[in-house]
Each structure stands twice: as structure tokens, then as C-alpha cells.
Image (cartoon, rainbow, N blue to C red):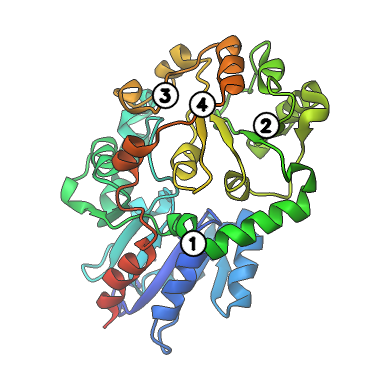
Amino acid sequence: MSLLCGGRRQRNFVYLMSFGDNLAFIRALAQASPVDRPLVVFYRPQQERAAQRLARSGIDVRPFRDDLAFVLTGIPQIMRARVLFCDNYYAFLGGLHHPKRMRIVQVWHAAGAIKRFGWDDPTTAQRSASDQRRFQAVYDHFDEYVVGSPAMARVFARSYRVPIDRMQVLGYPRSDRYSDPKWQQLSREAVAETAPELVDHRVILYAPTYREGVAFTPPAGLAAALTADPDAKVVVKIHPALKASAQQLQAQLGQQVVVTENLSTTDLLNVAETVITDYSSVAFDYSLVPNAHSLLFFLFDLDDYRQDPGVQPDLEDWLPGTVIKTTEQLAVAIKADAPTDLAQFNQRWNSANDGAATQRVVDRYAALLE
């Protein structure tokens, strides 16, 4: 189908959305689009709420799945894209006819990398030859990768086996919010309205990463460690797919836990004094918020995680603070409440995430529409 539509003129922006936290950038793309060539957003069904917010701004949004309907109606529209933005890995790109005039741009959903991915993931070598060919076909289709630092550029180039000159160190547009006083205020107000019990308390956010295909089993003593500060409020944000584990942990935490299913992790980062995570990209976001005080890496399963899916080889060289492996060490760190020096961490991973990334990215690609 893309070959059949390959003769169409590429003249507008198209955005493929599977994450709903880049809406400000999408609106900026819409504003930069000529009136006669409006932005089109294709979104995964799980982002229905985010798509509705875009639709209220007058943006053309269309749900898509990897099915025949998308082949017949979506691919012809995508083939009109002068710039095709992607916020994730989309397998169909590997089979898409790529006109010379079309620029396919990866706008990733994480500012840094603790876990390995792509060819760096040890499990990739175990996949079939056809799977591996498909992976590389998708990676090769990206003409440019928008990144927030040279460090992330090197990770992408190595993990996807693509030339380093495809990396554009422009900053992640979604990171701009953390430098925006208006967003900070609105975010704090949302937290205060939804979870007033957090106001005027030390907020400890526990946000472990999603372990694909693995049931999250908290180590013994975790609840006691998280509640080591009796005056703090503890918020647990575990991936929705692991909801049962979250409920079990919350029950163990008792009265100190605050259940906030209606609050996003992003909003919670804006009020948390302490964030405890492991291999999640929330660490790179939290290091940018003005209220960031202590960032603790609780890597109780590091030895196993090094094997599957793997971590960056130099991880312990650049993590801020020491790696915490036991609940006893975690309890001590929570009680100490010592500030974490995030300067070098941000210099490595957030060098271009300075609050002006959206404008730089829009300017670069809007010029292609002229």
C-alpha cells in the first residue's frame, strides 16, 4: 500500500502517538503547520483520553491498530507526511516504502537509559533471524533521533546500530514542562485537590520500573523501609499491569500509604521530596524538577537484572549516590534524608533539556514544510 501511495506529495506533519505526555509539543507542531496542511495524529487506543484533549484543540486525531483498516486508510495518509514523528518503536515501519522526501523522526519517551534495549538487550540475540531483520529495518527507517544529550545519542547509536550523525541533540520537548513555573503551579494544585493528605508532608514516591513478563515481587521488609520516616506520606506508583502487586504492597504500608490512581507520575514528581526507583526513566525526569531533593536507586535485583534485560555497562559510574541493594540500607537512606547531588547526572543526560527544546525541535522540522 505504501508503494501504491508513494507518488503522493509529502507535505505535512504526521505524529504516531503511543504515549500521552507530549501533548504540548504536538500542539506546537499543529500551530506550526500551514492552514492547508494540518497536522494528523494517529494514536493507540489506550491514549484515548490524551487524544480527546488534542481533539478539543482542533487537532485531527485518529485511532489506529496494526490491522487491515489501518493499511487501507492510515497508510495513504502517512504517505503524505513530510515529517513523520514517532514516539516509540512501530513494527510496521520496517515494511513501509520510504520516499526520499519523507523525514522519519524518533521522539523517544524517555530522557535517558538505565536498561538496555535494541541490540544491547541480551534477549535480542535469542530472537529469530526474521525478528532481528525486522528490528533493524525499523531502526534504519528513522532518519533522525531527537535526543536530550550526547550520552543518549551514543546509547541509541549503539543499541540500534545506526550512524551517530542521525542523532539530533535538540532536547526532549516533553522535558520543557519541568522548567515552566505555570505548569509547576497547576501540577501542585492538581495534587492538592486530588490528594490533600499529601500537603505539608514529606512525600516519598516509590516508582519501580515495569518488568516485562515478570511478576513484581517486593523484597521482604520493603514496607517497613518505605515507612521508616513516620511523618512522611508514601505514594506507590507501579505499572498498571502489576496492579495486584501494588495493592498488596499498599496494604502492607498501612496508614502512611496514599493511593493516587488519578494522579500521574509526572504530577507526583513535582511534589515529591524523595523518589525511590530502580531502572525507570522517572529518574531523569525527577532530576529536572525544582523540588528534587533526594533520588534513591533501590536495585535489590541488580544481579539478575544485569542478565535480563540488562543495564548500561557503566551504570554505577554515573548514578548519583550509591546503589541501595537491601531494605535495611533503604531505611537508613530514607531516615537520613540527605540531598542528592544531581549536577553531574543532569550534565550527562539532560544537557539539552533546558526548557527550550520544543521551540528548537519545531523550528528544525517546520522549516522542511516551507
Q: Which residue is mark 3?
A: 321
**In the rendered view, does 28 fall on the left or right side of 202?**
left
**Residue 1: % across, % down:** 39, 66
Q: Which residue is mark 1?
A: 180
Is label 2 in a helix, a strand or a loop?
helix
Q: Quadrant of the C terminus?
A: bottom left
Is label 1 in a helix, a strand or a loop?
loop
* Mark 2 or 1: the one toward you: 1
Residues under labels 2 and 3: Cα distance? 28 Å
Compare residues 370 and 95 and report the one nearer the observer: 370
**In the rendered view, does 217 fall on the left or right side of 40?**
right
Q: Image height check: is 74 above or below 348?
A: below
Q: Image height check: is 353 above or below 183?
A: above
Is label 4 in a helix, a strand or a loop?
loop
Q: Which residue is mark 2?
A: 242
Q: Please report whichever mark, 2 or 4, sits nearer to the chain's N-terminal start.
A: 2
Q: Please report whichever mark, 1 or 4, sits nearer to the chain's N-terminal start.
A: 1
Q: Image height check: is 40 above or below 235?
A: below
Residues under labels 1 and 4: Cα distance? 26 Å
Q: Which residue is mark 4?
A: 338
Query: Callout 1 environment at 10 Å: few (<14), some (14 to 19), or many (20+)?
Result: few
Q: Is residue 70 visible?
A: yes
Q: Amino acid at mark 4?
A: Ala
Residues under labels 2 and 4: Cα distance? 30 Å
Q: Amino acid at mark 3?
A: Gly
**In the rendered view, does 355 fall on the left or right side of 146?**
right
Q: Are marks 2 and 1 in contact (CB under 8 Å)?
A: no
Compare residues 132 and 108 and report the one nearer the observer: 108
**Residue 174: % across, % down:** 45, 57
Seen at 76% across and 37% down, the residue is 258
